[in-house]
Image (spheres, rainbow, N blue to C red):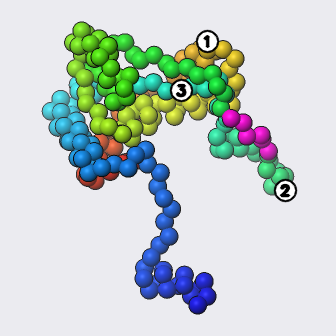
Amino acid sequence: MSRTSVFRVLTNKLNKKKKFSKWVPHLLTDEQKESRVNFSRNFLRRFQTEQNDFLGRIITGDETWVYSWDPETKRQSAEWRDFDEPRPEKVRRKQGALKKRPRLLESGILFHHDNAPVHTARAVTDVLAGYKWELLEHPHYSPDLAPCDFHLFPKMKEHLRGQRFETEEDIIQATKVAIKNLDKCSYVTAFKDWLQRIEKCANNGGCYVE
């Protein structure tokens, strides 16, 4: 049987479709999915009660690696050229070794971060307790439900790609400028997207959302 015939049988008669794998942060267990659903429902229940006062009191924070050299994305390196000109070529380079973790915000009432070991350490929990901040829960392996991971950091790093930094201070200053240059509406969008993702998670059995 020819490949064409096999393809016709699979698609037309058996109604099959070849699908590429979807990359996810973690293969969630049923228990972890249930935890994500519970988090989402509790968050939505509180939002329905307090509305924007609830969101307005949230400080969400995290840390990320910022490299001394991070290549441009394929989209960022695109150039306008004549139709018959060849595509531009650039050498693919590895990310630089010099890294910097931005510090967490230091004020807030409702504090949200993920379950990384650095966040659950006794020293950190003691500080939060001392300030009498309320700590919002966050399900394990859920960067898709963390605004810093799905929105802020990608937007920030768009401004840093293609630049080369020689010192840690250069990274700090460039990171501050990148964050400052983000459109204020972007933060509003992040929280709207957060709500939409949480609603999806509550309704899809705890699976990852986009």
Residue 7 visible in this rendered orientation of the protein: yes
Residue toward you, 202 or 188: 202
Instruction: Tell me which secondary structure the magenta stretch mostly adopts.
Output: loop
Residue 90 part of the magenta segment: yes
Q: Residue at x 24, y 42 (%)?
A: 35
Mark 2 and mark 1: Cα distance apart in space: 44 Å
Give the label on residue 65, or none: 3
Q: Position of residue 115 (x, y in %)?
A: 33, 30
Disc 1 marks which amino acid?
Answer: Glu
Q: State the quadrant of the N terminus.
A: bottom right
Q: Is 196 on the left-hand or right-hand side of 171?
A: left
Question: In terms of secondary structure, where does tag 3 sit?
Answer: loop
Q: Which class describes the residues within 10 Å of circle 3: few (<14), some (14-19), or many (20+)?
A: few
Which of the marked residues, 2 or 3, is nearer the chain's N terminus?
3
Residue toward you, 198 or 18: 18
Span of residues in magenta: 89-94
Q: Is 112 on the left-hand or right-hand side of 185?
A: left
Q: Position of residue 156 (x, y in %)?
A: 53, 28
Q: Residue at x 65, y 32 (%)?
A: 95
Q: Which residue is mark 1?
A: 169
Mark 3 and mark 1: Cα distance apart in space: 14 Å
Tell me if residue 157 comes above or below residue 59 in the rendering. Answer: below
Q: Is 33 on the left-hand or right-hand side of 4?
A: left
Q: Position of residue 201 (x, y in %)?
A: 29, 47
Q: Position of residue 59 (x, y in %)?
A: 33, 22
Nearer the observer: mark 2 or 3; the answer is: 3
